[in-house]
Image: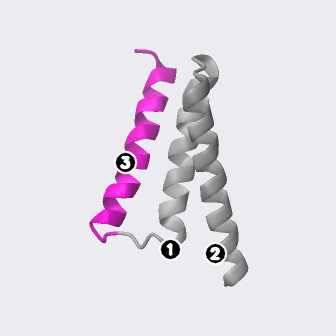
Amino acid sequence: MTLIDWLGVVGSFVIAGAYLAVSRGWVDGRLPAFNLMNLGGAGLILWSLYYRPNAGAILIEVLWVAIALLALFNYVRNR
């Protein structure tokens, strides 16, 4: 595996870790930490997909980025 492949793997673990943290109650899903983790993980996966494109994977990661950014925007707006 290349460094780029590892970036995608790390991104996957970051996203899975975010969901684990929320499901175990370690992180409140309404707070920025959850969405920042998803945004970071999706960014890493997208970075790896730039070098090894896959249309379906790119689409889902772009959607995760959009969802995370919208949630972060709403959080800031409501503060």
Which of these two is toward me, 60 or 21? 60
As drawn, 26 above or below 79: above
**What residue is at 47 percent from the left and 30 percent from the top?**
8
Name the residue that disc number 1 marks.
Answer: 30
State which tag comes first along the sequence, 2 or 1. 1
Name the residue that disc number 3 marks.
Answer: 16
**What residue is at 66 percent from the left and 58 percent from the top?**
69
Q: Secondary structure at mark 3?
A: helix
Mark 2–mark 1 contact, CB under 8 Å? yes
State which tag comes first along the sequence, 1 or 3. 3
Q: Which quadrant of the figure contains the N terminus?
A: top left
- Residue 3 position in % (x across, y down): 48, 21
Residue 34 among those drawn in magenta: no
In the image, farthest residue toward the bottom: 79
Q: Secondary structure at mark 2?
A: helix
- Horizontal side of 41 relative to 58 (left or right) equals left
Q: Which mark is residue 75?
A: 2
**What residue is at 64 percent from the left and 66 percent from the top?**
72
Q: Amino acid at mark 2?
A: Tyr
As drawn, 47 above or below 29: above
In the image, farthest residue toward the right: 77
Mark 2–mark 3 contact, CB under 8 Å? no
Which residues fall within the magenta stretch?
1-26
Q: Which mark is residue 46?
A: none
Q: Amino acid at mark 3?
A: Ala
Question: Gap in Å between the C-alphas at discs 1 and 3?
Answer: 17 Å
